Image: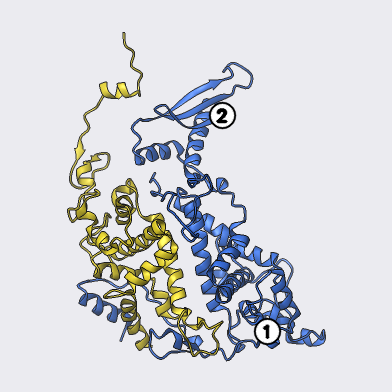
Amino acid sequence: MTIIRIGSPQASRFLARSIYLHKGPRVTGLKKDPQEAFTTNTGYKYEKSENNLKYIKGFLQDKYAISDDLALQVLTHKSFNNGVMPYNEKLSAMGSKLANLFFAKYVTEGSTNNENNVNGKNLDVLGSPIAKELSGRMTMGLFARSNELNKVMFWNSYGHGLGFETSGEMKVSAQMMYALIGAVAFSHGKEVGEQFIREKLLGGRASVEDITVRLVSGETSSN
Amino acid sequence: MIKGTIHQTWSRSLGVVSRRSYHVPSINKALKTEYDTINDYGSYKNNVFTHRLPESTAQQSPSLVALHSRLNLPSKYSLSTLSQALNLNINDGLVNNFGLNTLGKNLLSYYVSEHLLVKYPRLPMPIHNVAVDSLMGHETLHEIGKIWGIQVDSSTKLDKYLSQESEFIKYGKLRFLSEQQKGEVKESGVHELSSQESKTKIDSSFISDEAQAYASAVRSIIGGLYTHTGEEATKKFIQDHILSRKLPLEEMFQFNQPTRELVRLCDKLNFAEPLEIRLIAETGRLSAHAIYVAGAFCGTEKLGEGIGSSIAEAKTRSVVNALMSYYLYSPLDSEGNAAKVPSDKDYKFEGIVGLGDVSI
């Protein structure tokens, strides 16, 4: 006689249950069909496919390439499917700190005619709106949008149809950008991470600096 | 033109329809900042400040020279910058520490985060944030500032005159109190909260102005080190003074539903086998003081073990032990040393990146 222990793999084979997988709006107590749960509102299925990763891979190119696993993690927000899949929170924590540090150094590195400089660095610029906003969420969100980096993102909103900011897309896009910076820094080191910001975020068309100037200039002219 | 209107107009031109709630930073008018063009960073000047403390004056301050020596700062680090790092006042003409503080904060934030993210990649985010706060929060930096021997300039001009105190002494002290605040009579056991302190009040605790001033000075000293000696020396300084402090991470955890959390974690990690909590051994349940040993298993893999005076306690301890082993994991490199951080020379990615917390 064969004894099967409850909870053992053999038992789960014999005692397999038929579970109803629900599609459509959420109903308390019903398990969602993974096929649907792992698909975004725009129809992108959660997977390491070329279609999903092409935007950020194209942006990073070979010089700043990251692994497919990391790239998928960059694109995945905590809100997607209750955070079951690896998401970008830790990458984002790294990237935002690196971006803040880089831009603080960037605005103070040039020559200055301010006689109150400290060893050639003009620190008076650090409290200015542009210095604060260069690594800000709105700037990063708009940069991601203008470079089509947020075309494929795995996230959930309470209202996908709402505006860029109201739906949370700006915040999620910005977090994805920070995560991208963090992923490059994790994969290649801090120096390359800073080089990446300088070359890709400041060097290309619709650079972070252009976006910030436009964001902030309205404000300064109104003062 | 109203700020929101500009933003909405521009957002629409990008094909975005949004309702404004994002706050674009605004300029601090009290600083009387002037600049040529908005992104000509070298042209920014805060006209509220007239000058920096001359180096020749700073050299005459014994307290400043002593602090410089005590912190073992390099000779390249000028005394005038150190004095600036201790000045939080805005209205005395001397440049204050705002810029140095911002630089120092960014440097500290990066190196502290990098250290924690690489050394403890699986820390849940709330614990990570508490750990960051215990390394570079106001209270910690306040303590560090006191350990460094920074003194507060709390005597009024009259007190200084009567005690014939040299005017240079104050340049080596922490300056954040106004003359009026210095002259206020203090009642023992009574503390009137300032407007800034009131903002930080939670229940009966608050961050004092003094703690904030000390923290600001410590960050500014770090910022000053960067301006004079570069990033590598600053990193070393942060490692020596901040990251070397003991961090009781295991005391920061508190689990409300540990078993559920472990089940969710096993799901997230795609473990093939279900989680089982089994009794491994017992001293005899009819004995006077029975002791049980339980283990949390995933198939044949033991994730954690716990000892307790009841089966429930032993099981809970085994689950908590499994969770702690997971969360406090610290990766090693191929040579068995702690994994390098991205800012290290010859960095090679050998650690792991945290996958994110599980929702309970």
Determine the chain carrying the residue at label 1: B
Q: Which residue is nearer to you in this view: A212 or A207? A: A207
Q: Which residue is nearer to you in this view: A116 or A173? A: A116
Residue A89, image x, y percentages:
39, 55
**Distance from Cα at disc 1 to Cα at disc 2:** 61 Å
For the question of whether residue B147 can be seen, the reply is yes
Q: Which chain is yellow?
A: A
Disc 1 to disc 2: CB gap under 8 Å: no
Q: In this structure image, what is the colour of chain B? A: blue
Q: Which residue is mark 1?
A: B179
- Give, as a three-letter code, the residue at label 1: Glu
Residue A116, image x, y percentages:
55, 87
Tell whether B111 sits left or right of B68: left
Q: Which residue is nearer to you in this view: A131 or A118? A: A118
Residue B219, image x, y percentages:
58, 70
Please rate how many residues cluster around mark 2, counting C-alpha atoms within 10 Å: few if below 14, some from 14 to 19, many from 20: many
Quarter of the image with the C terminus of chain B is top left
Residue B307: image tag: 2
Residue drawn 50% across and 37% down?
B320
